[in-house]
Image (spheres, rainbow, N blue to C red):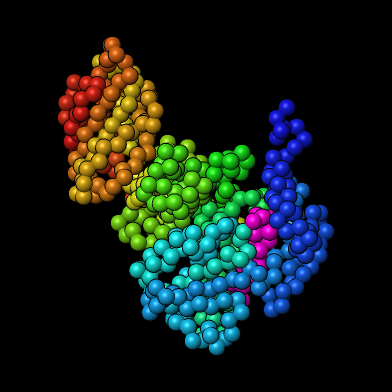
């Protein structure tokens, strides 16, 4: 019998291992943190932050069996590093204990929107250079207050204690926003918190307390200790006026965590949830690519790639979306990634609500939000930077020519446009096409093609002998890179027909003309 079969719950095993780590590391200090292992409720107070209850909704026998109170405020030592275009390199160092006088002397300006960035477990501003990269990207495109929230004093081992500390850090953020409101008249609606992993739930706790937060972007919210838990425990749509989520590491936590996977939630928890590449495994995160990161990004970058490549991708996609004005990362509402790949979800619906831009500009979709209904949006990305890919719907209409017969193989489409040229494989696996039938595919190009002027088609059969000719009637192409409402599909669909009428020969490219 396997160690993890029978009566042993694998999640419980991992969580108990985390608890054992705490006991070994902190010994007698474990009593100080007040452990709750059943649905009883106790309380501890933290000065101006108020009191926290343990147990109750924060307890679950499988998903959250061990709970601690947060560490003391001085131990977590939450820091707020303020950057603006007036001080883009050297931060104004504020903290949880900064008096109002220090806050008043900072570069904060209430007329600007404010971006707050917060990390997750084991991350720091030094190990996680992404926080400064995101700060720089924001200041490049807009005149913002950018505040990096550094809570490295509370995000270490064991994970169970770090999850408890997220509640305290969320409260510290809420209090800081209230102080900025008091000193400068700042409007909480102009604040946008971007959190990665545990940082997503930190943002949720801040918004829950504040009640008036403008926006939260959750970058692959952490799964362990938050999966299947009620909204009081995790990030949810009521935590801000608009909550958008990017999922990139939604595999099962166990056993995928042993491969550096499964750290993020898969379930939708925002007003709109984005699932690039299906939200589970990201291209460019295969073992070979991760090892190569040690060469291209050094020891720290390589270590992050080896450990959390899929989890990190949510950050990469959001940062790129801030500065990339050429490619929109447009995603489409669909029942699944499989259905998206089959071309079943290629327009924005009759009212425009069925598509949204992932990342920085996701709030353009805000008018369609519904607190009681989450929307799942899908898109694909490139394996490497730039990650934003260009999507096209391709309909292949076979001819009913009397000479035609079923053809099996792979099909390639070359697009020539005003901005470039790209050749893509139309089908993901060898497929059999029948005379008179119509087949729909989703394809992506890694770079911008622009307005399509010409096209060509190539068919490559799997057969060595008795190679049939392919009788193609026409190919329809719809660019999915700008919002298209359902009523606009027919007007924006491009149709190309083969110039030759005697069929396509295997492995020979055939030019297509506008029909």
Q: Is residue 230 left or right of residue 148?
A: right
Left or right relative to 21: residue 360: left
Q: Is residue 298 left or right of residue 124?
A: left
Residue 61 x, y percent position in the rendering: 76, 48
Determine the image quadrant of residue 327: bottom left
Give the residue displayed 71% in from the left and 33% down from the top: 3
Q: Quadrant of residue 200?
A: bottom right
* Front in this rendered view, residue 505 or 486: 505
Figure label count: 0
x%, y% of residue 390? 33, 47
Q: Which residue appears farthest toward the right when viewing the image?
A: 40
Of residues 316 and 238, the one drawn nearer to the viewer in this rendering: 316
- Residue 255 lies, with reference to residue 40, above or below; the image says above
Look at the image and say whether residue 242 sits in the magenta stretch. no
Quadrant location of the N terminus?
top right
* Location of the C terminus (image quadrant): top left
Report the front residue among 275 and 315. Answer: 315
Instruction: Identify the residue shown where x is 48% and y is 45%.
Output: 306
Instruction: Please give the name of the residue rendered at 61% of the width and 44% of the height, measured from the top-left corner.
Output: 253
Q: Chief secondary structure of the magenta span?
A: helix
Picture residue at 45% right of the left edge, 61% below the top: 129
Q: Quadrant of residue 161?
A: bottom right
Q: Relative to 174, is 321 above or below?
A: above
Give the magenta-colored segment's residue range: 157-175
> Is residue 23 shown above or below 416?
below
Furthest toward the top, the residue is: 465
Residue 54: give x, y in percent of width and height: 76, 62
Q: Let me know if residue 37 appears in the view.
A: yes
């Amino acid at each position: 019998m396997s160690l993890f079969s029978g009566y042993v719950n694998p999640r419980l095993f991992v969580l108990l291992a985390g608890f054992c780590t705490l006991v070994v590391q902190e010994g007698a200090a474990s009593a100080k943190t007040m452990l709750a292992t059943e649905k009883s409720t106790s309380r501890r107070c933290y000065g101006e932050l108020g009191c926290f209850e343990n147990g109750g909704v924060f307890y679950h026998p499988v998903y959250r069996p061990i709970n601690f109170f947060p560490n003391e405020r001085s131990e977590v030592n939450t820091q707020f590093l303020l950057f603006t275009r007036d001080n883009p390199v050297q931060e104004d160092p504020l903290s949880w204990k900064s008096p109002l006088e220090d806050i008043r002397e900072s570069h904060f300006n209430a007329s600007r929107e404010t971006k707050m960035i917060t990390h997750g477990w084991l991350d720091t501003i030094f190990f996680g250079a992404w926080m400064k990269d995101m700060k720089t990207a924001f200041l490049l495109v807009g005149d913002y207050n950018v505040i990096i929230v550094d809570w490295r004093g509370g995000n270490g081992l064991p994970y169970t204690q770090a999850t408890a500390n997220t509640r305290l850090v969320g409260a510290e953020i809420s209090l800081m926003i209230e102080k900025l409101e008091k000193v400068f008249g700042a409007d909480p609606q102009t604040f946008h918190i971007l959190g990665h992993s545990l940082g997503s739930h930190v943002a949720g706790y801040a918004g829950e307390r504040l009640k008036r937060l403008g926006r939260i972007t959750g970058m692959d919210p952490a799964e362990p200790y938050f999966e299947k838990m009620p909204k009081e425990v995790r990030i949810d749509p009521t935590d801000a006026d608009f909550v958008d989520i990017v999922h990139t590491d939604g595999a099962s936590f166990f056993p995928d965590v042993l491969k550096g996977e499964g750290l993020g939630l898969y379930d939708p928890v925002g007003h709109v949830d984005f699932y690039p590449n299906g939200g589970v495994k990201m291209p460019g995160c295969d073992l070979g690519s991760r090892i190569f990161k040690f060469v291209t990004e050094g020891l720290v970058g390589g270590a992050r790639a080896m450990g959390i490549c899929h989890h990190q991708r949510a950050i990469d996609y959001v940062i790129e979306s801030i500065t990339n004005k050429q490619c929109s990362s447009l995603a489409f509402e669909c029942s699944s990634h499989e259905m998206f790949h089959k071309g079943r979800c290629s327009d924005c619906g009759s009212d425009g609500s069925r598509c949204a831009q992932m990342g920085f500009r996701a709030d353009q979709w805000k008018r369609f939000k519904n607190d009681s209904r989450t929307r799942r949006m899908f898109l694909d990305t490139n394996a490497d930077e730039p990650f934003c890919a260009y999507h096209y719907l391709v309909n292949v209409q076979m001819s009913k020519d009397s000479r035609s017969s079923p053809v099996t193989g792979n099909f390639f489409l070359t697009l020539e446009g005003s901005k470039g040229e790209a050749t893509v494989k139309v089908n993901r696996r060898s497929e059999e096409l029948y005379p008179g039938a119509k087949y729909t595919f989703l394809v992506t190009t890694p770079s911008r093609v622009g307005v399509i002027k010409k096209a060509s088609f190539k068919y490559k059969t799997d057969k060595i002998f008795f190679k049939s000719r392919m009788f193609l009637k026409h190919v329809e192409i719809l660019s999915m890179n700008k919002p298209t409402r359902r009523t606009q599909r027919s007007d924006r669909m491009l149709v190309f027909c083969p110039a030759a009428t005697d069929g396509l020969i295997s492995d020979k490219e055939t030019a297509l003309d506008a029909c």
